[in-house]
């Protein structure tokens, strides 16, 4: 859609912006809502499962929805430098938008736990990358402290403008389906996104644009599940590095979304995540990152609880190209290498 103006301009009456806000945009938003035929068939019971493919945002994750807001407001307030802690996608997005807005971007990452594509982006977008010997939660404590004491705007999801931007994904889903879905399945790390979606669904419902509210179903990776286990996880581990978080900052908001929506939280194992990741790739033609596949893995896991004829949206938060290492190590492809450049040999392998 050539005329899509980016989400701030498209949804400005729902967002805390004025005529004076300098809009810093890469025309994020308006991502596809795709029917997942193979997944729907696996659930059965006449259920329709859709993917909100937010990995098709400008930097390849939903973080762009929040970042266009956070950076535009930072610019409006005269900020010259932003800072964030990141498992990768926030740093890529913060760097892109900050630089586009003429600001510096400092990003703290857990050394060795950021997928290659995300690190590549932060570097190319011109961030100043600070890799710490520690995990995401420790990086976040540092940036929170730094932003209190120095002229730095914090653009993690504690920044309220982030969630404001991210809530537009719910608007798009309703604009597309004509109503809210029955279930919204979403991976949780810091749990900002589930909180933002819930805010968006409530706002459209209150304005009578939608007739129902979805149940919010959040999924965490098994050894990184502070919200399911209701305790801080000191050393979270999972293949899904984007949700490798032990102490989510939006915990209270997420719990409220769960209770108010009569939803639930569950864990999925790394094996279940990889299964869903492969199915999405080879049966749906959708390449997402492992954290994103947690939403589909979770839905498959709870399929017996799903009511017949439900409409379900799974949020695919990030693009598969972000984490090539995961892709290369986790696929069922037939890959023949070291072949002679000889047609007879080649077609023989193809089975002719
Ligand atoms: C940030 C991120 C998440 C987690 O989102 P929260 O708002 O922290 O819960 C999930 N998937 C991907 C790909 C992400 O980048």
Image (cartoon, rainbow, N blue to C red):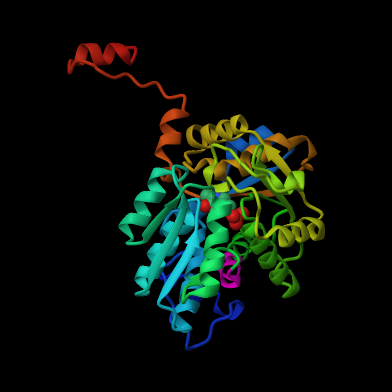
Q: Quadrant of the N terminus?
A: bottom left
User: Which residue ends up furthest to the bottom in the rendered image?
Assistant: 20
Residue 166 magenta? yes
Nearer to the camera, 78 or 220: 78
Q: Residue 321, position in %: x, y?
A: 41, 44
- The secondary structure making up most of the magenta span is helix
Q: In terms of image quadrants, where is residue 39? A: top right
Nearer to the camera, 59 or 325: 325
Image position of 232 (left or right of 274): right
Q: Residue 277, position in %: x, y?
A: 53, 36
Q: Residue 63, position in %: x, y?
A: 51, 60
The residue positioned 42% from the left and 24% from the top of the image is 333
Q: Quadrant of the C terminus?
A: top left
Q: In terms of image quadrants, where is residue 203? A: bottom right
- Asked whether the viewer can see residue 330, the reply is yes
Q: How many marks?
A: 0
Asked if residue 260 is positioned above or below residue 120 in the image, the reply reads below
Image position of 95 (left or right of 352): right
The residue positioned 17% from the left and 15% from the top of the image is 342
Residue span colored magenta? 159-168
Residue 248 magenta? no
User: Which residue ends up furthest to the left in the rendered image?
Assistant: 341
Asked if residue 114 is positioned above or below residue 62 in the image, the reply reads above
């Amino acid at each position: 859609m050539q005329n899509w103006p980016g989400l701030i301009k498209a949804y400005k009456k729902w967002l805390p912006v004025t005529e004076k806000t300098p809009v810093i945009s890469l025309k994020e938003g308006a991502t596809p809502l795709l029917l997942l035929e193979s997944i729907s068939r696996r659930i059965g019971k006449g259920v329709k499962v859709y993917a909100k493919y937010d990995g098709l945002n400008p930097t390849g994750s939903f973080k762009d929805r929040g970042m266009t807001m956070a950076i535009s407001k930072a610019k409006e307030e005269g900020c010259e430098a932003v800072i964030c802690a990141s498992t990768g996608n926030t740093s890529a997005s913060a760097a892109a938008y900050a630089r586009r807005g003429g600001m510096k971007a400092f990003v703290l990452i857990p050394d060795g736990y950021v997928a290659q594509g995300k690190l590549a982006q932060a570097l190319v977008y011109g961030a100043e990358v600070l890799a710490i010997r520690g995990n995401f939660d420790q990086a976040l404590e540092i940036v929170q402290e730094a932003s209190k004491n120095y002229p730095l705007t914090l653009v993690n999801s504690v920044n309220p403008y982030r969630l404001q931007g991210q809530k537009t994904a719910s608007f798009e889903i309703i604009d597309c389906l004509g109503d809210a879905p029955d279930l919204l399945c979403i991976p949780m790390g810091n749990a900002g996104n589930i909180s933002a979606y819930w805010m968006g669904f409530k706002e459209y419902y209150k304005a009578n644009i939608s007739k129902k509210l979805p149940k919010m179903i959040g999924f965490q990776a098994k050894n990184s599940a502070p919200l399911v286990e209701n305790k801080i996880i000191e050393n979270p581990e999972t293949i899904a590095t984007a949700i490798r978080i032990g102490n989510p900052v939006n915990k209270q908001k997420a719990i409220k979304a769960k209770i108010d929506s009569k939803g639930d939280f569950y864990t999925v194992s790394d094996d279940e995540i990889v299964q869903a990741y492969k199915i999405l790739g080879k049966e749906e033609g959708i390449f997402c990152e492992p954290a994103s596949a947690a939403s589909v893995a979770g839905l498959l896991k709870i399929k017996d609880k799903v009511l017949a004829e439900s409409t379900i949206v799974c949020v695919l938060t990030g693009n598969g190209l972000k984490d090539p290492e995961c892709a290369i190590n986790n696929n069922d492809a037939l890959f023949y290498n070291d072949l002679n450049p000889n047609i007879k040999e080649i077609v023989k392998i193809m089975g002719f």
